[in-house]
Image (cartoon, rainbow, N blue to C red):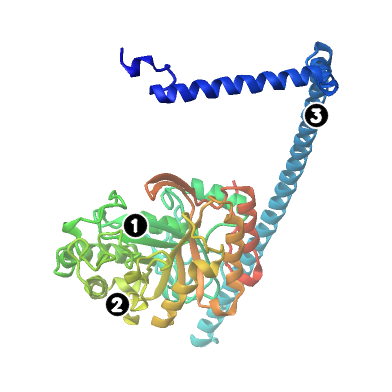
Amino acid sequence: MSSAVSAHWWAPTTSKSRLTTLASVAFVTALSIMTYVVWTSPGGQSTVQAIQEALSPTHLQAENAQLTATISGLEQKVADLESTVSLQSDQVEALLAEQLEQKSSYTALLAEAQQELVDVRAELDRANASLEAARESGGGSGSAPAAPSSPGAPGGGGGAGGGGGSGGGAGGGSGDSPDTPAITAPSLASILDPDYRYFGMYTEQAPFNWATLDNTAAKIGASPNLVGYFSGWDEEFRASAVTRAWQQGRVPMLTWESRPIESKNDVIDEPEYSLPVIIEGGFDDYLRQYARDIIATGLPLVIRLDHEMNGVWYPWNEVTSKGASINGNSRGDFVKMWRHVHDIFEEEGANEYVGWLWSPNIVNNLPALQKDPAFLASLYPGDEYVDWVGLSGYLRPAYKPDQVFTFDYSFGASLDQLRALTDKPIMLSEVGASETGGHKPEWVTSFFESFRQEENADVIGFAWFNLAVTTYVEGERSTNDWRIDSRADSLLAFITGLSDPAAEFRLIPVAGP
């Protein structure tokens, strides 16, 4: 028999088996001695007795009863605290609801007062115009000055007179009709150089359906005086968007994308819509007809052509973060495209009705190449081709470690770049704030406070993206609720800021039921 076989099962070799045996014997001997000492010493007897008492049923029952009482007391304390928190939450919600109602009512009164002032000024303008006309006609012919029309009445189909009280106006439609009043609008010049600020809104269906916009306006207490909407280059000019907007007294602002309207935002390769194709005349027939249709409608609008041109996510962007071509485009192509479209509209006479809005994205999260002020400058067509400049900017996750939730953090650097390029009026043409992280009320408050600051006197308004959108952020599915009324505290912050007279927004009363 080998030595390996004679080893104990817990020892791998014979020599180690002997050592293991000796160690085991020593351990058992020591344990026996300790046990004897404990049981035979006077102190040991006390210890044994204490152990026996601790393990007795009576002692265990007492401990269980004490623990049960403690748990019961803690559970009651938790219940009391939950009740207190619930009561306080109800009180906070009630107070917030009361504040919302008060702010909304105040905003409604402010809008009504502003509208009354506009109507009175319009009546005064018409009366002065009638008096001047009578004087020019000789005044002594016995004919009395024409009586002014009632406040707020629209002008005739010829386009004279402004229903909005801004002086000159544009008229659209088929002329006067006893059943269908002509649709009128202020002059393009007065729209582009307003003496108040614009409160605009995008919804999923406006201006073709007002349900969401009207519902939100009712909560605010005032309606937007500008409405934004989108259209692609596979669509004809939709005159109804413009006429429906002006029927409500709202400036129509068209975001006009040189791609099909159903294209996804993550698709940048659409070679048939590349900038060189447009520059070389591939869409000239379409553009000329579009311009003619605008003229036929006879009402002004603002066109935001191919927005966020300084990004890397649209087929009209020029280059990637590494300088590689996007969609066959090259550096300098965007300016050529913009001027080409503008020139066609000029040739057709449509620029009499169109204000051109050049609107990049805020630079905060752009790649280094696109963040450079020189890059943005290379995309600017020039003052003679632009009426407004603008920005798209959101409070959106993922947030940076050093981020602060203020207007200046979101827009400050981008505004500096815009103002270095031009002194054109600035429209914050697409803005919103996510509820993710709980910073929205703080950001909205800061957003409106910025309109009271002298350095932002050139910012003539904003258009809020009033939708909830699900996208993928860094590979994870995320829903951002940009809506004005996403939460009660966010809505209150919005109403408070919008209704501040120092912010100089022109508010339209909410239409009655």
Measured from the top left, where is residue 434 in percent x and y?
Answer: 51, 53
Residue plotted at (71% across, 44% down): 93
* Comes first in the chain, label 3 or label 1: 3
Label 3, label 2: how many angstroms apart (C-alpha)? 68 Å
Residue mark closest to the camera, 3 vs 2:
3
| Amino acid type at image mark 2 | Ser
Q: Dot 1, how many residues are within 10 Å of its Cα: few (below 14), some (14-19), or many (20+)?
A: some
Horizontal arrangement in the rendering, residue 90 relative to residue 210 (left or right) = right
* Comes first in the chain, label 2 or label 1: 1
Residue topped by disc 1: 239
Horizontal arrangement in the rendering, residue 195 relative to residue 335 (left or right) = right
Label 2, label 1: how many angstroms apart (C-alpha)? 33 Å
Residue mark closest to the camera, 2 vs 1:
2
Residue 378 badge: 2
Residue 76 badge: 3
Residue mark closest to the camera, 3 vs 1:
3
Label 3, label 1: how many angstroms apart (C-alpha)? 67 Å
In terms of depth relative to the viewer, which is nearer, 245 or 62?
A: 62
Q: Are marks 3 and 2 in contact (CB under 8 Å)?
A: no
